[in-house]
Image (spheres, grey):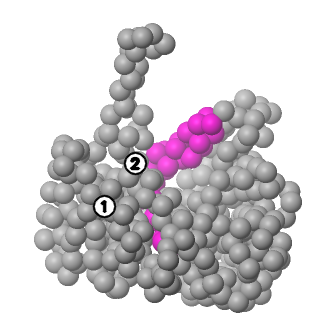
Amino acid sequence: MRKTYKIAVIGGDGTGPEVVAEGIKVLKAASAKFGFVLNLKDYDYGGERYKRTGEILPEGAVEDLKQYDAIYLGAIGHPDVKPGILEKGILLTLRFALDQYINLRPVKLYPGVWTPLKDKEPKDIDFVVVRENTEGLYTGSGGNLKKGTPDEVAIQTSINTRKGVERCLRFAFEIARKRNKNKKLTLCGKTNVLTFAFDLWERAFHEIGEKEYPDIQRDYAHVDATSMWMIKNPEWFDVIVTDNMFGDIITDLGAMVQGGMGIAAGGNLNPEGVSMFEPIGGSAPKYTGKNVINPLAAICAGQMMMDFLGEKEAAAAIEKAVMKVTGEKLKSMAAGKMGYSTTEVGDLVASLV
């Protein structure tokens, strides 16, 4: 009997539905070849629904999504909706409610993809960032006093729990062990200034590493130094682990290092629950409906989803197909400059799976 996976599909805003459609095309090709079944259901969460109903997520949405094996997301962000409303109301709500405590971001340069880093090749850019995804500054802890007056005070507190830090670190150590590349884990922090939060991170890092992962080399770098080395010597990194805010920043830097938002994908993971996979780029509303947006990041997000669900062969075949397309077909990763339309790129990858 073939294995069936229940996947909730949230196309979202702008070009999100377009790129997800190409990802689904590729996933269906993989399912046909490797003998599993995808049970897909669409959800219309996003800006248009909010404009129409005033509702971001309907009552019961989180409980409903808990019934799925994974969530496949396109993009959130609508030009007619004030920034932050949809992002907080959908993305952050789902991350926190579903306890997706890991944000996983592979940073990998594929053949044929231009990188702004001079003299760097695919062999030099292949690392993973593990970002803590449900704590830190993103908890919304804090407030305002005397708002709107000259004496206004704004406080935002970074919350770091031992439980949250430890489970993130253990996940990162496991990734370093499974990759079996350099078997090195770098903690990215700011111990010289954020002396409370990163004292916790650093102590837990070395305690866990020494007791449970003696085979993994431990390394530390301040976030500013990490940013410099990601540009100058990306080959130094194997796996980087960091908190929510620093992870948010350096993963966007990583996207540029690997060739731009058109190729960068990520996963919001709950290893014991429901995880969500998405392209890193935004909704790109100016390209909506023009069939010119690059769908490879969404296709790579689908590949990550299959890998996470245990369909390793399918995931490997999708990545190999993407690499063939980037290496031999596309002229550029930029929208409208690929040499192919959005749907044609999807067709190319699907045909090579």
Q: Secondary structure at mark 2?
A: helix
Residue 150 or 22: which is nearer the viewer? 150
Q: Identify the residue under disc 1.
A: 225
Q: Is 249 one of the magenta-colored residues?
A: no
Residue found 80% across the figure and 33% down from its top: 52
Residue found 79% across the figure and 51% down from its top: 286
Between the residue at mark 2 and the residue at mark 1, the CA separation in whole angstroms equals: 16 Å
Residue 8 lies, in percent from the top left, at 66, 58
Residue found 45% across the figure and 53% down from its top: 248
Q: Kindly indicate the quadrant of the structure image that contains residue 125.
A: bottom left
Tell me which segment is drawn in magenta.
Answer: 83-108
Q: The disc labelled 2 sits on which kind of residue?
A: Met
Q: The disc labelled 1 sits on which kind of residue?
A: Ala
- Residue 208 lies left or right of residue 342; in this view the side is left
**Residue 118 seen:** yes
Residue 327 lies, in percent from the top left, at 65, 87
- Residue 272 lies left or right of residue 256; in this view the side is left
Residue count near mark 1 (Cα–Cα under 10 Å), binned few <14, some 14–19, many ≥20: few
**Residue 309 seen:** no
- Residue 121 lies left or right of residue 246; in this view the side is right
How many numbered marks, from 0 up?
A: 2
Q: Secondary structure at mark 1?
A: helix
Residue 283 or 229: which is nearer the viewer? 229
Determine which of the numbered discs, if any, sits on residue 245 in the image. 2
The mark lying in front, picked from 2 and 1, is 1
Residue found 41% across the figure and 19% down from its top: 144
Nearest to N terminus: mark 2 or mark 1:
1
